[in-house]
Image: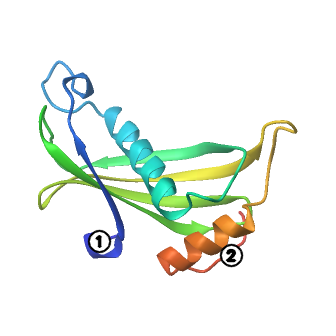
Amino acid sequence: MSAQAFRFFTPMRVRWADCDAFGHVNNASYLSYFEEARIDYWKAVVPDVPFTGMAIVHASVDFRGQAFPGDVLTIGAAVTELRRTSFWAAYEVRRGDTLMATGRSAQVFFDYGTQKPAPIPEAFRARIASYEGIAPTAADV
């Protein structure tokens, strides 16, 4: 997904705690950046759509460059595919025009009472599909 394809961005300053002994952002910190971007995305795109549970079932990061304490990063986030109970999200992390990392995650709506996947709420599905310009449904695999 190119920078032009992302509609949602959130800024983040690299904290000292995000870094490792080599002085750059630790690989695990990028997943936290993705999480922060997801939370900001929900607040911006679906703030009034209630849902009871969600679980991350896949997360991946491809590293392209190094970021350092004090750097201001921009994290792009997008939902790229809606399925019956799950959806895929894509992310990119940039420092200015320089790409630092890209990633993906799969989230499943989950009923913690029954311990089973739950259908994506229709209001969530409709709002995301409209915002992203993607198909509102796809088959779960």
The x, y position of residue 38, in whole percent, is: 46, 51
Residue at the image position 55 percent from the left and 79 percent from the top: 130
Q: Is residue 119 left or right of residue 18?
A: right
Residue 141, numbered circle:
none
Quarter containing the N terminus: bottom left
Amino acid type at circle 1 is Ser
Residue drawn where x is 59% and y is 43% of the image:
56
The front one of 3 and 14 is: 14
Instruction: Classify the position of the C terminus by image quarter.
Output: bottom right
Query: Which residue corresponds to the image point at 26% horizontal and 28% vertical from the top-left?
Result: 18
- Dot 1: what SS? loop
Image coordinates for residue 43, horizontal then vertical, percent: 49, 54
Give the residue displayed 73% in from the left and 62% down from the top: 121
Q: Residues within 10 Å of mark 2 (few under 14, many from 20)?
A: some
Residue type at numbered disc 2: Thr
**Residue on which the image places disc 1:** 2
Kindly indicate the quadrant of the structure image that contains residue 137.
bottom right
Q: Position of residue 26 (x, y in %)?
A: 26, 30
Residue underneath mark 2: 137
Mark pair 1, 2: CA separation: 23 Å
Q: Is residue 120 left or right of residue 91?
A: right
Foreground of the two, 58 or 111: 111
Mark 1 or mark 2: name the one nearer the start of the chain: 1
